[in-house]
Image (tube, helix red, strand yellow):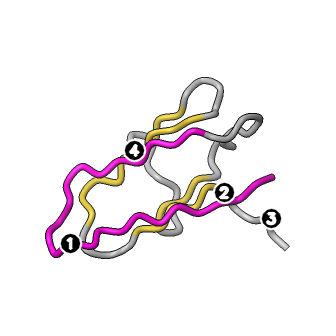
């Protein structure tokens, strides 16, 4: 299991509209369904599109205010 975090920042004073993230996993890795989090919550089904193999995704964040949004690519095990 590999966990990683993407942080998207808008350094401008203006809102960025229609922000999306496109990512592809390293060879041999796949996105586990239901594991992604955006600011701690699961993204809506309409916001996340994965390819059939689970090796890539497009995530629609929508409008991005001048602050960071954190996208967690997985959850650590519950202890």
Image check: 78 left or right of 55? right
Q: Quadrant of residue 63?
A: bottom left
Q: Earlier in the sequence, mark 2 or mark 1?
A: 1
Q: Quadrant of residue 11?
A: bottom left
For the residue carrying disc 1, how many other residues have a C-alpha within 10 Å: few (<14), some (14-19), or many (20+)?
A: few
Q: Are marks 2 and 1 in contact (CB under 8 Å)?
A: no
Which element carries disc 2, helix, strand or loop? Answer: loop
Q: Nearer the viewer, residue 16 or 34?
A: 16
Which element carries disc 3, helix, strand or loop? Answer: loop
- Residue where numbered disc 3 is placed: 77
- Residue where numbered disc 1 is placed: 12
**Numbered badge on residue 74:** 2
Q: Is residue 69 above or below residue 59?
A: below
Q: Is residue 53 above or below residue 29?
A: above
- Residue where numbered disc 4 is placed: 47
For the residue carrying disc 2, how many other residues have a C-alpha within 10 Å: few (<14), some (14-19), or many (20+)?
A: some
**Which residues fall within the magenta stretch?**
1-24
Q: Earlier in the sequence, mark 4 or mark 1?
A: 1
Query: Measured from the top left, where is residue 3 in percent x and y?
Result: 71, 59
Residue at position x 41%, y 68% in the image: 69
Determine the CA span between mark 2 and mark 1.
29 Å
Residue at position x 80%, y 64% in the image: 77
Q: Earlier in the sequence, mark 4 or mark 3?
A: 4
Q: Quadrant of residue 29?
A: top right
Determine the CA span between mark 3 and mark 2.
9 Å
Image check: 64 left or right of 68? left
Query: Measured from the top left, where is residue 65 in percent x and y?
Result: 24, 70
Which element carries disc 4, helix, strand or loop? Answer: loop
């Amino acid at each position: 299991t590999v966990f990683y975090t993407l942080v998207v920042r808008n350094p401008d004073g203006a809102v960025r509209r229609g922000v999306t993230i496109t990512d592809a996993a390293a060879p041999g890795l796949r996105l586990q369904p239901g594991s992604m989090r955006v600011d701690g919550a699961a993204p809506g089904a309409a916001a996340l599109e994965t390819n059939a193999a689970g090796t890539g995704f497009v995530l629609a964040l929508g409008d991005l205010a001048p602050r960071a949004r954190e996208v967690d690519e997985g959850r650590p095990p519950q202890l």
